[in-house]
Image (cartoon, helix red, strand yellow):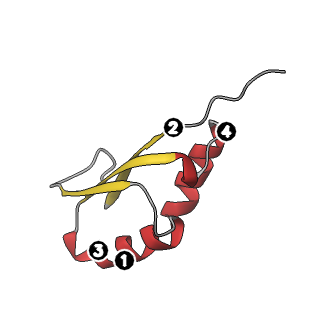
Amino acid sequence: MISAMLDQTLQVYLASSKDCIDIIVFLCRYGSFLRIQYTYCEFFDLNGPARNTIAVRGLPHPDAIVEIKAVALRAQRSVA
């Protein structure tokens, strides 16, 4: 679900996971780290973007256990 939501957000801006250059993962339950790591490795290839994982006490949505900030840099397309 996490990767699908990130993918949808990137598509809105005509970007993809290959355009991501930095990821910050805010994680409420550090026990979920391995699951997040597995999802990250499935979504990005071995040359994926830099990533930081930060343990937090809470997130804006009370039921959320993870929030992801992604920075993508899309190559500018020339107009012919």
Q: Is residue 74 above or below residue 65?
A: above
Residue name at image x 28 percent, y 73 percent: 33
How many angstroms separate mark 2 from mark 4 (CA)?
Answer: 11 Å
Q: Are marks 2 and 3 in contact (CB under 8 Å)?
A: no
Q: Which mark is residue 73?
A: 2
Residue sitting nearer the eye, 28 or 62: 28
Residue sitting nearer the eye, 56 or 71: 71
- Please tell me how many numbered marks the rendered image carries: 4
> Can residue 1 be seen by looking at this rendering?
no
Q: Earlier in the sequence, mark 2 or mark 4?
A: 4
Residue name at image x 50 percent, y 64 percent: 44
Within the image, what quadrant is residue 51 found in? bottom left
How many angstroms separate mark 4 from mark 1 (CA)?
Answer: 28 Å
Residue name at image x 58 percent, y 37 percent: 74
Q: Earlier in the sequence, mark 2 or mark 1?
A: 1
Q: Which mark is residue 32?
A: 3
Q: Which mark is residue 49?
A: none
Q: Which residue is mark 1?
A: 35
Within the image, what quadrant is residue 63 found in? bottom left
Q: Secondary structure at mark 3?
A: helix
Q: Earlier in the sequence, mark 3 or mark 4?
A: 4
Q: Secondary structure at mark 2?
A: loop
How many angstroms separate mark 2 from mark 1 (CA)?
Answer: 26 Å
